Amino acid sequence: MPGACGSLETDFKIQWQEGSPFQKYRLLCFEPAGHGRARPPLRSWPSANLLQRDADDFAFCLKEIGIDTANLIGWSDGGITAMCVAGNKKLASVVESMTVFGSNATLPEKDRELYLKMRNTDNWGARARESYEKVYGTAEFKEMWAKWVDCFITYIDERDGDVCRTELKNITARSLVIHGEKDFFLTQDMADELVNGLRGNNVPVQYESFPDGKHNLHMKYSQEFARICIDFIDA
């Protein structure tokens, strides 16, 4: 389950390559409406409900293709979507297990400025934009990213920063939380919130950290990431 404005091509290309350890499974990449190959339509931006809507759409897609349960692996927004699926009593039965990384349940007010500063993709390095611009084109990605930032911030304005805190309280699926200790977006306390929240639900939870891992740790440390995920899924 990819991150903000993400797709298989931008976020999980390594995991889909021939020879990837993940090839032992049937792999499905959920691209929300408006992402990647799921275009048209263009992405729409429901205020303070974007990822909850994606959770509903994900469960609908599984039903349409005849899959009763799945092991979810979600990065960033995709991890939040996974938690919204697992924490929704109407949807949770589809979750065999849940792995999340680079994901947060709370968006604090102090992070508003952080997101606003990265709103204009003209200020990004070319390498950071490259894979997204290959999928969407320069102009469309610039507009899409700005709209994502504006939409994500509505979780502060309309839900007091509750991106998926409410859903976190209801998760019962066994879970793996992975954290990159050098993640620019996700602080240690955000990872701790997930782990402590899950343990508070009496959920079997495994926590793994990458001391030098950044937000995209699954790309730089793809083999170790695969080992951890596969050991967890197969346990």
Image: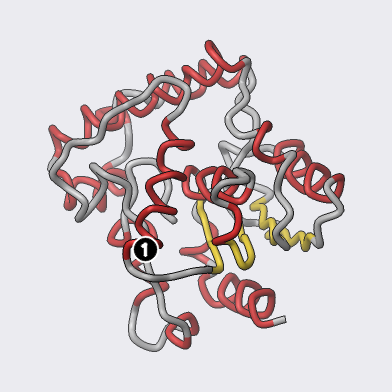
Instruction: Give the colouring mode of the picture.
Output: secondary structure
Label tally = 1
What's the residue at 40%, 62% (across, down)?
Answer: 62
Horizontal side of 97 relative to 62 (left or right) equals right
Mark 1: amino acid: Cys
Res. 213 image quadrant: bottom right
Residue 123's x, y, as percent?
31, 28
Q: Nearer the viewer, residue 89 or 29?
A: 89
Name the residue at 61% across, 34% down.
Answer: 164
| Vertical side of 73 occupied by 196: above or below | above
The local secondary structure at tag 1 comes to loop
- 59 horizontally vs 106: left or right: left
Q: Position of residue 140 (x, y in %)?
A: 15, 34
| Label 1: few (<14), some (14–19) or many (≥20) C-alpha neighbours in 10 Å | some
Q: Quadrant of the N terminus?
A: bottom left
> Which residue is nearer to you in this view: 33 or 224?
33
* Residue 171 in the image, given as x and y percentages of width and height: 70, 48
From the viewer's perspective, is 231 left or right of 70?
A: right
Q: Is residue 75 above or below residue 28?
A: above
Mark 1 lies on residue:
29
